[in-house]
Image (cartoon, rainbow, N blue to C red):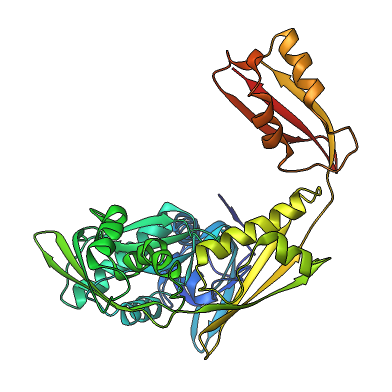
Amino acid sequence: MWIRMLVISLALNAQQKFPVLRIGATGHTRLPEQAVVAASGLKLKELAEASTFAKACERIVNSGFYRSCNFQYQPLTQGSVSGFDLRFEIQEMAETQETLLELPGADEAAVWAAITKADPLIQRSIPTTNEASIRYIDAIEAELKRRGVARKITAKTEGDLSGSRPRLVFRPADLAKVKSASFSGNKAIDASRLQTAILRAAADTEFTERSFNALLNLNIRPMYEELGHLAVQFPSIRATEANGDAAVSVSVEEGPVYKLGAVNFTGDAENPAALLKAAGFRIGATANWTQVSSAIDKAREDFSSRGYLATVMKQNRQLNADNTVVLTIDIAKGKLFYFGDLILSGLDVNQERAARRQWKLKPGDPMNGSYTNTFLKSLLRGQEFENLKSVSSSMKPAGDDRVDVEIRFR
């Protein structure tokens, strides 16, 4: 961070104090001009001199929202008043992340609306600096206090399992911890099984409705989807708090049991009928999604066995009114990879000779992604390898479309 002054000569004496009659800014893109002014701490008609502007530029940089600040000023007369026309030239922080408010018991939307209205620096995305985080925390705590709730707020970066960028979550520092859970509305799965499953993941975690819902979707939803309840919902999640402990009550809407109506392939599906058979989809049976996912993996292995090691399969499921689900899989098979070289370590001379005799792939053959595991299962049945304790393997890039296979024995 740096500050540079650009001063245009003035008819005013720079050592004397005159009112600031106009404040502007250039270089801002994410934040509005008034945010720069707010960060500067200057007010219109405030008496100032050149050193005042240097200190204001310092405050702009120290706010944590701007990487650099320059300024220029010139004389301005409004009516009979002479003063300064000040302009900041700033560069914003490039790295930002999204924010989330989690305030159990408070109207989160109203708190967010209040703090963004009061401070133009506060937006949905925040620079990744400690100074910016502190400003947000102070603003949230002040708004909660204004509403009669005195709570300390913490900020924590949270990864998103969907693959989105991490975000900064603001939440109370004194959240209650999950100690028990109960379920209502469940019929297909016994409540005790549900309780055991969710508490295995959620016990002693800080309770917010959002975080607990995420754990339900990770741990309880798959249990229902194994039974074909693909539309299961958890419409109500409530916590009763006492002495820092949270007893959570969850209502369940199980929905109907779906059958697998059809599986369609789009994109790089060269032979859909053969792929459907190889994957083993059970058309007409209950849509046990664990089995469906396993069939998708087998379809992916079909491509991998032919050298398409980076095949991507995007799935979309359509739930129909007749309680059937239609699965559409869009396939992007990607680049064809070829075998380069076999690298072995940890074997004696006789063992390595035996291993290379059994290895069937030749340089330039399409790289069968599952061949190494098949090879090792067969190889390690031989008596000459009984002394080995462990084995690990990996594929290493050896060019744009070639991979070497490295196997390490111990």
Identify whether 36 is placed above or below 80: above
Up-down: is 342 above or below 257?
above
Q: In the rendered image, which quarter is residue 134 located in?
A: bottom left
Quarter location, residue 105 = bottom left
Residue 187 x %, y %: 28, 76
**Residue sitting at the far right:** 364
Query: Which residue is depicted at the point 31% across and 69% down?
Result: 189
Q: For the C terminus, which image quadrant?
A: top right
Q: Residue at x 13, y 66 (%)?
A: 241
Residue 67 to residue 107: above or below: above
Percent position of residue 369, x then y: 73, 43
Rendered location of residue 288, percent (x, y): 50, 68
Q: Nearer the viewer, residue 189 or 52?
A: 189
Left or right placement of residue 409 versus residue 272 in this view: left
Q: Count the marks.
A: 0
Camera-side residue: 183 or 50?
Answer: 183
- 244 horizontally vs 42: left or right: left
User: Which residue is found at the position 83% from the left and 31% from the top?
Assistant: 360
The residue closer to the viewer here, 119 or 353, is: 353
Report the residue that reaches farthest toward the top.
Answer: 349
- The answer to whether 289 appears left or right of 305 in the picture is left
Is residue 6 something that shows in the picture? Answer: no
From this view, report whether residue 409 is shown above or below residue 369.
Answer: above
Q: Is residue 284 visible to us here?
A: yes
Q: Which residue appears farthest toward the left when viewing the image? A: 243
Q: Please provide percent x and percent y for residue 376.
A: 67, 29
